[in-house]
Image: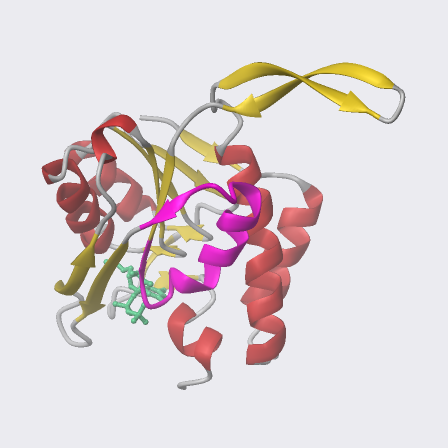
Amino acid sequence: MAVHLISHPVAQDLLTQLRDAQTPSPLFRQYAQRLSVLIATEAMRDLPTRPVVVDTPLGPADGARIASDVVVVPVLRAGLGMLDAVLSVVPHARVGHIGLQRDEATAVASQYYAKFPSGLDSSVVVLVDPMLATGGSAVASLQLLADRGARRTRLLCIVAAPEGIREVEAAFPDVQIYTPAIDHHLNAHKFIVPGLGDFGDRLYGTM
Ligand code: PRP
Ligand code: URA
């Protein structure tokens, strides 16, 4: 499995502002959106294209259009903070949803919703979940997608913990992870340190 670290200075600047506990929800949403565009752009680097010719005002020009079907799957609820950004990069993508909630005491994720478009087996599937902590949510999501036939799945995160990366790698060695940060460790409550806190709460102001 490969972890693609998004080291672009603009990405790192946005990540730093997301980490800042003083950043209020309206700005947090904006920074998450802008950072997700950069992550998604990098994650789509290997999409196949087909050659096309278009007419510019001055004549024909050789070009390329994305040739692959793409399905974006945000993990509710925090993944919704990345969805519009990914769709701005691949507007033709279809969207599935997975609802997972970590138990506050055990950090074990339980599923409350799942809905997918058809044809996952022939699509590039882009799973978006900003926090990869224990990896429980990611592995559960990847298993749901694999059960529906998804074979080419990539995971887009905003912060990843080494524990979560190891968990995904052990269960799904072919999955590529795109993230601007691999943090130090998980604390006793399974929160990422230094991380940025609870992404969903900061996104929606539910602290
Ligand atoms: C957060 C986050 C991930 C999950 C990561 O969601 O958005 O889905 O925790 O943790 P894990 O790697 O240990 O599974 P949470 O369950 O808090 O729900 P929310 O998105 O509704 O806030
Ligand atoms: N979910 C979050 O939102 N933050 C963490 O640090 C871990 C899980």
Q: Residue at x 20, y 32 (%)?
A: 172
Residue at 22% in and 49% down: 116
Q: Nearer the viewer, residue 113 or 158?
A: 113
- Rendered location of residue 137, percent (x, y): 22, 55
- Compared to residue 114, the image places residue 174 above or below, namely above
Image quadrant containing the N terminus: top left
Return the x and y of residue 132 as percentages of the image width and height.
33, 52
At horizontal 13% and vertical 70% (from top left) the residue drawn is 106
Q: Is residue 164 visible?
A: yes
As drawn, 56 above or below 165: above
Whether residue 198 is visible here, answered yes or no, is no
For ligand 2, which image quadrant applies?
A: bottom left
Eyeballing the image, is 104 above or below 157?
below
The front one of 17 and 115 is 115
Quadrant housing residue 79: bottom left
Direction from residue 120 to residue 194 in the image, left or right: right
Left/right placement of residue 43 relative to residue 37 reads left
Q: Is residue 80 magenta?
A: yes
Query: Of 155 and 59, which appears nearest the observer?
Result: 59
The furthest residue to the right: 58
Q: Which residue is nearer to you in this view: 128 or 71?
A: 71
Q: State yes or no: residue 54 in magenta.
A: no
Percent coordinates x, y for residue 58 in the rendering:
89, 21
* Colour theme: secondary structure
Extent of the magenta region:
74-95
The x and y percentages for residue 41 are: 57, 38
Q: Is residue 81 left or right of residue 18?
A: left
Question: At x 61% / y 63%, what residue is drawn?
Answer: 31
